[in-house]
Amino acid sequence: MIYGKMWTVVRPQLGIPLFLTAVAVSSFAVHLALVTNTPWLQAYYQGGAKAAAAPAPMAAPAAAPAP
C-alpha cells in the first residue's frame, strides 16, 4: 500500500469515515450544481418539448418578370 504509513498518523476509525463523507459531500455538490445550472435539464425531466407543429406551407414563388 502506498500510503500505509498514513494510518500511523490518522486512525482508520477517523480517516475512513472522513474520506467517505468528503466523497459523498463533493458528489452531492457536483450533482446539485448540475441540476441548478443547466437549463435543459428541467425540460429533460419533464419530457422535453412537445411535438413541433407542422410547418406552414410555403408561398408559391413569384412569377419571373417577362423579358
Image (cartoon, helix red, strand yellow):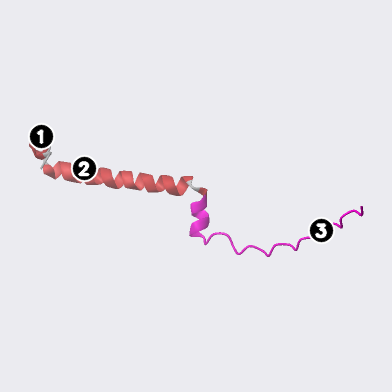
For numbered disc 2, what is the local secondary structure? helix
In magenta stretch: residue 31? no
Mark 1, mark 3: which one is toward the viewer? 3
Q: What residue is shown at x 87% (from left), y 55% (from top)?
A: 64
What whole-number distance in Å separates the C-alpha atoms at marks 1 and 2?
A: 14 Å
In the picture of the structure, the residue carrying the numbered disc 2 is: 18
Mark 2, mark 3: which one is toward the viewer? 3
Q: What residue is shown at x 67% (from left), y 64% (from top)?
A: 53
- Point out the stretch of residues depicted in magenta: 40-67
- Asked whether 59 or 42 is in front, the reply is 59
Name the amino acid, label 3. Answer: Pro
Residue 59 placement: quadrant? bottom right
Which of the labelled discs sits on residue 47, or is there none? none
Residue 2 placement: quadrant? top left
For numbered disc 1, what is the local secondary structure? loop
Name the amino acid, label 2. Answer: Leu
In the picture of the structure, the residue carrying the numbered disc 3 is: 61
In the picture of the structure, the residue carrying the numbered disc 1 is: 9
